[in-house]
Image (cartoon, helix red, strand yellow):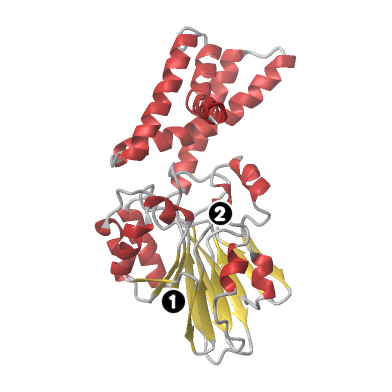
Amino acid sequence: MFWKNAKRFMIFWSFVLLAAYLVYIYPLHRLTTWLGYPTVLNVPAIVGLSFAVVAILRLSFRSSSRALEVTLYNWMGIGFVFFTPCLLYEVLRLGLPLNDRWAALLILAIGISVVIFAFANAQRLHCKELRFGHPRFTRNTRLVQISDVHIGSRSAGFLERVVKTINDKNPDFVLITGDFLDAKRVGPRDIAALKTLKAPIYFSIGNHERYAGLEWVIPMLEDAGCVLLRTEAVSFEELQLIGIDDAEDQHQVKNELAKIDLKPECFKVLMYHRPLGWEAAVDSGIDLMLCGHTHNGQIFPFNWLVRQQFQKVRGLHIRDNCHLYVSPGTGTWGPAMRLGSRNEITCIDLHC
């Protein structure tokens, strides 16, 4: 047992050190070498810096310093942007007689431009509009979905902009499909803008709420005006809203839907954080399933990796009479950067 645990420990921390090097150090190491300054990061400096990055990351997870988190997360995002062109050039120079210095200058110019765009793109809010008609409706209803706002990674000021945009849409209900916050240091003042929403808020738990600790997250959200639906449903005439907690269990949606009294005469909207369990939703007669979690990869080319884990990573999907919509997220986790994706507030009109 001891050796098994020791092996897992070594594998885990070797992976962490490798990831820290590749994202935080590798681009800087290669660019300085190609620019003609190979001594800036020699082997001892690389090893020491890798351990230092891991130690600081571990400290940031336990501290309440937003400045430390922002620095590390944004460095991670910048490193990820530069990692791709550096790796591509690394491959090209194996077989082609290229000039390292000019290549490094070109990578710097392209990388800096992309980083600036990614930071600017992450500040923009896009509104996506969907329309669903159904004979059950006797009046028009507007829902607004937000997902993965990630207050903690994002500021209270960003949330204020989100709330203002939602209020401008005049929804009947606001639906939050998890990962609204992502840090234990988030307090009532950080999410106070929720109290200015002009429509009732219904909330389903995401994985980051679980990580932060439901024992204090739930009371704080309820105090801000959220109604948490935890394997629960509420009905409003011909509309039924259903919420299920996020879980690692692949059968979570199937197991929890079996516990809920689903009304066949209602248009049923299911909120579940991650885009899994759609088959169970179809079998249960759900009309619309709303998810998030994927961020649509957030930063290219991470999109490709996300697609290896989830079949549905963004957008609207239809099977039989059930619709699935996967939001790319309203905010950003970690670095406040978007590349190949965008922040979205989803406006859903249900009409008769």
Residue located 47% across and 56% down the image:
148
Which amino acid, by three-letter code, is at mark 2? Glu
Q: Return the x and y of residue 99 as percentages of the image width and height.
A: 63, 13
Mark 2 and mark 1: Cα distance apart in space: 28 Å
- Nearer to the camera, 203 or 29: 203
Is residue 218 left or right of 253 when viewed as pictured? Answer: left
Residue 42 visible within the image? no
State the residue lying farthest toward the top: 39
Q: How crowded is mark 1: few (under 14 residues within 10 Å), some or many (20 or more)?
A: some
The N terminus: image quadrant: top right
Name the residue tied to disc 2. 248
For the residue labelled by badge 1, is the local secondary structure a helix, a strand or a loop? strand
In primary-sequence order, the first of circles 2 and 1 is 1
Residue located 50% across and 8% down the image:
38
Q: Is residue 287 above or below residue 61?
A: below
Q: In this view, does 122 lie above or below 345?
A: above
State the residue lying farthest toward the front: 1
